[in-house]
Amino acid sequence: MSDFIKFRNQYPEFVFNSYELTENSETINIRYNFEIKGLSSFSPEWKIKKCSPENITDDIKLQKLVFSLGMVELVSYWKITCSPRVSVLCGTLDEKQIRWWKTQYFNGLGEFFYRNGINTDFDSFMQISTADNIVYEGSDTSRSLEGCLIPVGGGKDSIVTLELLKETHDKNCCYLINRRNSIYQSAYTAGFSDDKIILANRTLDKNMLRLNSEGFLNGHTPFSAIVAFSAVIAAYINNKKYVVLSNEASANESTVKNSDVNHQYSKSFEFENDFAEYEKEYIGSGVFYFSLLRPLSEFQIAKYFAKLEPYHKIFRSCNAGSKTDVWCGNCSKCLFVFLILSPFIPYEKLCDILGNPMADREDMREMFDGLIGISDEKPFECVGSREEINFAITQAIKNLEKENHKLPFLFEYYKTTDNYKEYENKQNPLHSYFNDVNNLPDFFVKIIKTKCYD
């Protein structure tokens, strides 16, 4: 019997018991109360900065947002046992909403199911029941919103967004989840002072970490969905009209060929669209969530970032090294960043920036094969499309050979592959690429078309 079946049989019910929303003059404070019946309870917490001392916790839209953040937060705890029943005792959802949440969970857990060898389907993986006729008490107000809230993760994509929106800087704020030096340095370099930085502190429950270490189910959950709901909360309480993400077109590509398994599902346009429609219909905060970089490829983003030299020594994209604010130099995310920047930053300088000559390492060949599409699986990281990576490597090889520079190991190896034969003389459409499938308001489309094309 698989662990999936065993745990579901042993712990058939997960409960979202309640949430508590309080505030002081500086933050709103949220505590969720989840439970796997017969196993453990969980009480994760959030603290989100507010710039005004006014009391806001009686706001009905805020209460709906906080409940919704709990609905996406719960999946990190539900996945421990994948209990077949989820009982929501602190909120009411209609049938359309229940299907919406199941869709987000099912698609967002695609990698979790795949990597844990879980064979399940949409109808049977979870049944959700909710309380009847929960009524939100308080004021249903309309807030005056303007400017952008920009989630910043410390990587090149959000830095490009910060720079593209520099002309509207005075009306904008940065949004950061948990304190990390690279994130703060990115915001400071973009000209944001502490009073323009909205910090959210998210605390995981230690019981989840303990159960993970004891062999219960573990794996990837849709973190970008957590960013979405928490960022809209932060924007709403700080009177910002737009939450401006930095998700590019290639986030739509599946991680496993010929499947729907996508490590980046909650960064995809499908999620962005679904989220915007759900928020408008069921919450109505007036905050609009979209990705500024959706029209662009990772290739174009890397090209733009290469010109932003003040950020080159401070940006960090490595998840493995995030806690210590370093590039680990040994993971597929580090290798991807090296490859996508390689056409635009000289080789020695790139090695210095990332602290590692990754393209010259034979031990990274397996990761390399996944990135370029020789393997069916891309690495389970937020990386660009297979096409983008192949065009980047081909251009980097041309640049090095033009300079009579010795090719590093992975580039020499690449020249022996069928990929090189395919891409060597192939016309690269990415320089002028524009993805029309996006949600950018016209003002932001103009910014992209003005600043991102030579």
Image (cartoon, grey):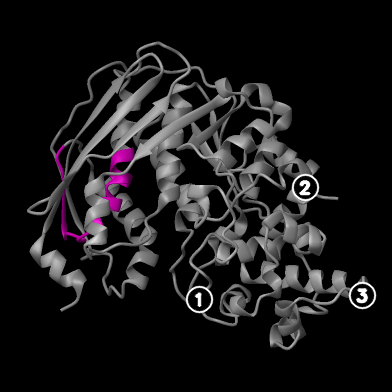
Of 152 and 443, nearer the camera is 152
User: Magenta residues, as a range?
Assistant: 69-89
Given this view, does label 2 or label 3 mark the residue nearer the observer?
3
Q: Identify the residue at the far top of this view.
A: 54
Marks 2 and 3 in Cβ contact (< 8 Å): no
Residue type highlighted by circle 2: Cys
Vertical comparison of 222 with 17: above or below: below
Residue type highlighted by circle 1: Glu
In the rendered image, residue 247, in percent from the top left (x then y), is placed at 57, 50
Q: Is residue 378 left or right of residue 30?
A: right
Vertical comparison of 242 with 350: above or below: above
Given this view, does label 3 or label 1 mark the residue nearer the observer?
3
Q: Please give the name of the residue rendered at 76% of the width and 86% of the height, measured from the top-left corner.
A: 421
User: Can you identify the residue that label 3 sits on?
Assistant: 404
Which badge, 2 or 3, comes first in the chain's sequence? Answer: 3
Q: Is residue 108 left or right of residue 370?
A: left
Q: Please give the name of the residue rendered at 67% of the width and 69% of the height, measured from the top-left corner.
A: 358
- Disc sitting over residue 184 in the figure: none
In the rendered image, residue 289, in percent from the top left (x then y), is placed at 51, 38
Which badge, 3 or 1, comes first in the chain's sequence? Answer: 1
Residue type highlighted by circle 3: Asn
Q: In the rendered structure, does residue 143 fall within the stretch colored magenta?
A: no
Q: Element under label 2?
A: loop
Q: Is residue 2 left or right of residue 336?
A: left
In the rendered image, residue 446, in percent from the top left (x then y), is placed at 74, 39
User: Can you identify the residue that label 2 sits on?
Assistant: 452
- Disc sitting over residue 377 in the figure: 1
Q: Please give the name of the residue rendered at 31% of the width and 44% of the height, measured from the top-left corner.
A: 204
Per the model, the C-alpha gap separating discs 2 and 3 is 30 Å
Q: Residue 449: name its quadrant.
A: top right
Mark 1 closeness class: few <14, some 14–19, many ≥20 residues within 10 Å: some
